[in-house]
Amino acid sequence: MDVGLLIRDLRKQHSWSQGRLADELNAANGYRTNVTREEVSRWERGKVTPGPWWLTRLATVLQVPLAILENPAMYRRQFLTTVAATTIAPVVGNDLLSHGFASALKGKPSGDAWQNTLETYGRDYMSAGAAELQQRLAGDLVVLQQQLDTPEMWQVAARMATLYAKTYPGSDGTKAVDWYRLAAEAADRSGDTQTRVWVRGRAAIALGYEGAALPVAGRFADAALALSDKPSLGRLNAVMGKAHAAVNQGDRATARALLDEGQRVFDVAASGDREESDYAVPEWRMNVFVSLLAARLGDEQRAVKAQDRAAALLPASLPRFRTHLEMHRGLMLARAGDRAGGAAYAQSALDRLPPEKHSLTLRMLMDEIRA
């Protein structure tokens, strides 16, 4: 077994494309390197062997001991069969065990404390990285599952599990979708219609915006819309998620009709402009949704109008979403025929955002623009 095949196997263990591995390597090096998908492909096909410098960085990004890559024949079988139990899992498990035990010693958090925690996560989602949120959420979910004895606690669990799902890329086909389904079940246990609609709608817009698991996004949206016809943020997310799924599947007429319906729902259910939370959809965020949808539709006039409006209202504390808008412009260029220019424009916007602010969604959008 040569090192190229081992790199491929390790990459697939992370559910990453070759382009994603290249992006991770560049990010790990502070974008001082420009590894391409083609270079990763040459490594994996054995056309080029990575030198010691690259092996060290591959080991860091792929989260394996360097010795595995330096001697793949000796270590491959051991890694593929036992790494979850011997390398990664104990570290994560120990952290979760410590968190749960410490919480038990302090006493169970009150319902109000959990609500405060939930509100903090809603705000932090807007600026924190996925890895940081994922670790914190995992610890709190371990504690929370011991307190699921009231409808209110099931509501907290449903919203927290939804955020946890969003720390995984929807394109991996398993983790994100499985957690969205668990979140929906938790919402059902709460008996609260608004929560049930919001969880399913949030799953739909997350997957639809990413352009991932589109049939699942459509089913989540349909389920949300069937639960209630009352204008709400959950229904808004469902309508816009269904619209993104439709345009990505080539159904432009349905996407346009849903965009108009989403605007009508937003006019009734919009959040206040000062709200900075994943649980809110103020005007600037609605325009981010519209910007990408219109760019995917090829409706440049509507896209530019939404981008300008979003940029004018966007809080300075949320630079990641300004990067979204700039990358939508890159997508417009690519769809208009200037693929190289569009990709370069979007990459430049992404490069200006500090690496620790990057999100899974931005990386998936970059893949879409390149394609």
Image: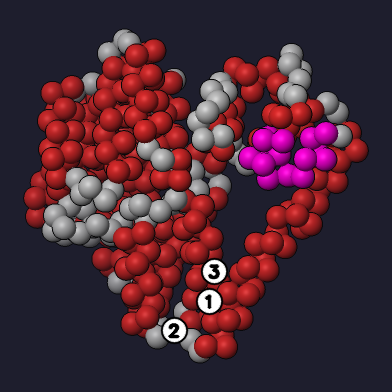
Q: Main secondary structure of the magenta part?
A: helix
Residue marked by disc 3: 139
Residue marked by disc 1: 143
The quadrant where residue 190 appears? bottom left
* Relative depth, front residue between 41 and 51: 51
Mark number, residue 109: 2
Residue 256 versus residue 161 in the image, above or below: above
Q: Which residues are magenta?
A: 56-70
Alpha-carbon span between mark 2 and mark 3: 13 Å
| N-term mark: 1 or 2 | 2
Could you tell me which quadrant the C terminus lies in?
top left
Alpha-carbon span between mark 3 and mark 1: 7 Å
Point 48% across, 86% down: residue? 108
The quadrant where residue 43 appears? top right
The quadrant where residue 272 appears? bottom left
Point 41% across, 74% down: residue? 154
Callout 3 touching callout 1 (CB < 8 Å) = yes
> Is residue 225 something one can see in this rendering?
no
> Is residue 175 something one can see in this rendering?
yes
Residue 145 placement, left or right of 114: right
Q: Magenta segment: does it hold 244? A: no
Q: Say which amino acid is labelled 3.
A: Gly
Callout 1 touching callout 2 (CB < 8 Å) = yes
Alpha-carbon span between mark 1 and mark 2: 9 Å
